[in-house]
Image (tube, coloured by chain):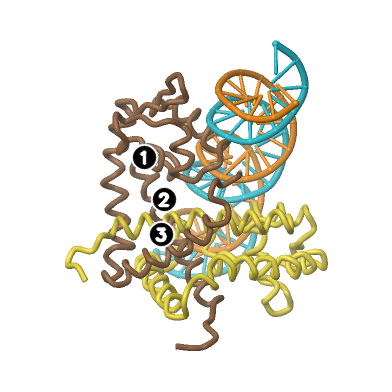
Chain colours: A brown, B yellow, C cyan, D orange
DNA sequence: GAACCATGGTTGATGTGTCAACTCGTTGAT
DNA sequence: ATCAACGAGTTGACACATCAACCATGGTTC
């Protein structure tokens, strides 16, 4: 333990992991399923929602996305037939969307396990979860209503 | 300690931190300096290189970027006068680029400290660095020459 | 009711990232 | 010497993200 912890060393290591890890997982997901990370996040959220449908605002809060980003993404996904927009800003998962997320889930979880879960010990996973929660708490304490 | 560690809980916590933390830092950086994360990474690498110039290939390896991404990014930065391309695929930092990275560094480091360094203990920072190194080692063991 | 304003959602312009296809110079085998 | 193969770099097309400006609606205040 040092009294002056090297923040920048930890930051640079974290940055390198972030770039490489998400790059690898997204590349594998895209190659084998044709879905982007954004597609996957939306479909995953929809699938595990009651009745496979949610309000737009729930997606925005749950994923912490900007509203314009969500709007563009939903428009593209509706054009591809993965979702449907219903009156009242309600988003429905289509059958095609349900198929694709089911196939993608296996691929995604396998990749997460291969490059992340299998590499770290239970203690490390727990430590990372705690670290993440602390940082997230710091980020959301000031701007609880993410005023993008 | 559990025998079946909950990988997905750690993954989801990490994902949330990743999205919110980088979003916040990049937003602050962009607002106060006009530089994107990509701009900052390039300028930072250039600044701390000998003679403020590097070969393209060094940037690609150091930042683990795709070649086309780097090419597009360097073209845009040259148009803005932040860098110069010299024969032999050598990239030079211009005076304007040096000014901007100097101003941005303070902003960036302050943000990293505010949302990251100050939130975590020395042990947590060390643990995160170890975790990151392990994951990166796993990612680079198979494809050491990142065949993008 | 009328003016006001806050909020959810959309749109268009622009900057950014990715993929595939291409050029060009070097290398190595025959 | 020629040809094939490889890697570095570029380009163009497209998907994605961000910002600002815009519309609609539902209060709140006077």
Q: Where is residue A3 in the image (x, y as percent from the top left)?
A: 52, 88
Q: Position of residue A17 (x, y in %)?
A: 45, 66
At x 53%, y 58%, the residue is A139
Are dots 3 and 1 in contact, CB under 8 Å? no
Kindly tell me whether residue B55 is visible in this rendering.
no
- Which of A116/B120 is in front? B120
Chain bearing mark 2? A
Are dots 2 and 3 in contact, CB under 8 Å? no
Question: Circle 3 sits in a helix, a strand or a loop, which is it?
Answer: helix
Displayed quadrant of residue B51: bottom right
Of circles 2 and 1, the one toward us is 1
Q: Which mark is residue A31?
A: none
Q: Earlier in the sequence, mark 2 or mark 1?
A: 2
At x 76%, y 67%, the residue is B103
User: Quarter of the image containing the N terminus of chain A?
Assistant: bottom left
Q: How would you rate the neighbour count of disc 3 (Cα within 10 Å): few for under 14, some for 14-19, many for 20 or more?
A: many
Are both tags, 2 and 1, on one chain?
yes
Vertical placement of B100 versus A102: above or below? below
Are both tags, 2 and 3, on one chain?
no
Displayed quadrant of residue B13: bottom left
Kindly tell me whether residue A14 is visible in this rendering.
yes
Question: Circle 1 sits in a helix, a strand or a loop, which is it?
Answer: helix
The residue labelled by disc 2 is A27
Of circles 2 and 3, the one toward us is 3
Q: Which mark is residue A45?
A: 1
Q: How would you rate the neighbour count of disc 2 (Cα within 10 Å): few for under 14, some for 14-19, many for 20 or more?
A: some
């Amino acid at each position: 333990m040092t009294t002056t912890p090297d923040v920048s060393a930890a930051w640079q290591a974290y940055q390198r992991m972030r770039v490489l890890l998400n790059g690898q997982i997204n590349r594998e997901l895209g190659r084998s399923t044709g879905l982007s990370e954004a597609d996957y996040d939306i479909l995953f959220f929809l699938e595990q929602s009651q009745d496979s449908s949610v309000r737009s605002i729930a997606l925005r809060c749950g994923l912490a996305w900007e509203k314009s980003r969500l709007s563009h993404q939903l428009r593209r996904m509706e054009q591809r037939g993965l979702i449907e927009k219903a009156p009242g800003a309600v988003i429905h998962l289509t059958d095609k969307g349900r198929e694709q997320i089911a196939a993608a889930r296996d691929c995604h979880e396998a990749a997460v396990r291969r490059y992340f879960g299998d590499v770290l010990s239970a203690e490390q996973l727990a430590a990372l979860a705690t670290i993440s929660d602390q940082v997230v708490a710091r980020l959301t304490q000031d701007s609880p209503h993410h005023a993008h």
